[in-house]
Image (cartoon, rainbow, N blue to C red):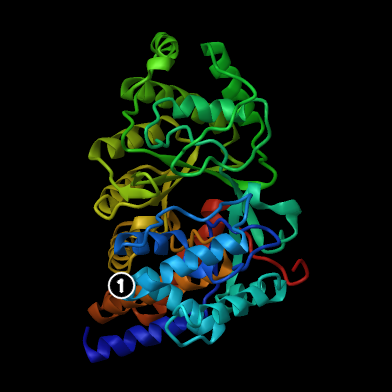
Amino acid sequence: MSVENSTLANEVEEALAELPMFDVHTHLVGGHLGARGLHDVLLYHMVVSDLYAAGCPSGARLTQYPGWPTHEEAHQRLTEAIPYLPLIRNTSCFWGARLILRDLYDWHEPITLDNWQRADAMIRDRADDRTWWYSVLDRLHIQRTCTESARREGGVDDARLQYSTEWSFFTRCQWGEFDTALYELERAWGRKPEAATPIGGGQRAPTDRTIHSLDDVRAAVAHYVDNLPYDLIVSTATGVSTDIDYRLVSDAEMAAALSRRAQAGPTERDIYASYINELFLTGLEQHAERIVYQFSLGAEPLPFETGSRLTQRTIGQLGEIMARHPRLRFECFLSSRHANQSLCTLARELPNLSLVGYWWHNFFPDVIRQVIAERLDMLPVNKQVGFFSDAYCVEWTYGKAVLARKQMARVLADKIELGQYTRDDALAIAKAILFETPQTALGMAPFTAEAS
């Protein structure tokens, strides 16, 4: 990057920092929007993956919601991880952690075994301060944040939050399982919406009911569709696995596969997921004016987290699925760099598909720049949303917003230098994808000062 272009990028970044925006997908918990300690900054799951790759013994997440890590668990994991921090000082995830500590907590020292408790105490001191949480969001000009409805906690932060339901994931594979779609449907049947099953599966909680027949499947799907809280949420979010062969499955095929559940393998997995998903989308389409179907794509299960994998077959099958349900609005969170161009071509030809942000394995600076540049060149502004953080605390909302803003500024500066955009064009386009499209495509709404 030339000196002139670098200067221009810095100027664009400063201007972007003044624009209003939405964060359309997070896992913030009402009443607990802030980090509970240093572990929520340094042991965010993407940083845990960095540390695990560097040799840190633990690769699993800490205790997840609705539980919380104890002081003992958090401190044990911190002292285990800190010796490995020098080995990840090059990564962009750790850059995000450093930005959080520097900008929000005025912390400029490397975290060591000798000083981490001071940083931890500083963060814990603000953990329950709602004024602090909101000040971080206001610093970013975030007008509203979307999180899971299961994390609403009685609506104590409704003024700043909107909601999406992540309940059962019928099309997400879990490590070593082949009847996941059936289990996900069973755990919802007869119940109200609750938190999703964690990535990685593991020991399954018992269900109230068991599916034995096609009638059971139909009844359970109908219950699921009827019990989504349409008046509360703007979307339902799920995961789509590339390992599943998506096709239209007959009643006879599904009935036969149900009889083989105890011996289920990949063939049965694909039948269960395809049949249930088609029933679900058909039912959901009857509520198309009230909800958006969001799906994550390109992250496949590993023992602790996921790896980025996506086949061209899946992209083609998704196109067929979306074409079969033209009234239902689909939004994709993509975690595969190579698939962005293909998804853009689908969004150009499918009126009901839009693309959102940079998910998980795409949230790295070079990938973000490629994704932004391709989408700006290929899609109208009303078919793309420019940001979501996937954060579990407002500190990581900040870290990821700053990282994404820096990349957007570089892309826009390049296009200004090329003569494709004027500066005014660039900022208007940025405002459209950061602030306007989340409202028109998803139903996000700015908070009001009176409400907060």
Coordinates of residue 245 in the picture (x, y in percent): 31, 28
Quadrant housing residue 409: bottom left
Residue 188 shown left or right of residue 158 in the figure: left
4 or 423: nearer the eye? 4
Coordinates of residue 198 in the picture (x, y in percent): 50, 44
Where 250 falls versus 284 (above or below)? Answer: above
Residue at label 1? 87
Is any atom of residue 432 visible in this view?
Answer: no
Residue drawn 34% across the image and 28% down it:
246
Residue 112 shown left or right of residue 290 in the figure: left
283 or 157: nearer the eye? 157
The quarter of the rendered structure image containing the N terminus is bottom left
Where 197 falls versus 2 (above or below)? Answer: above
435 or 300: nearer the eye? 300
Residue drawn 62% across the image and 68% down it:
34
Residue drawn 32% across the image and 44% down it:
346
* Amino acid type, callout 1: Leu
Quadrant housing residue 75: bottom right
For mark 1, give the secondary structure. helix
Q: Residues within 10 Å of mark 1 (few under 14, many from 20)?
A: some
Residue drawn 67% across the image and 77% down it:
125
The quarter of the rendered structure image containing the C terminus is bottom right
Is any atom of residue 47 visible in this view?
Answer: yes
Where 117 falls versus 188 (above or below)? Answer: below
Residue 71 shown left or right of residue 4 in the figure: right
Quadrant housing residue 290: top right
Coordinates of residue 191 in the picture (x, y in percent): 67, 30
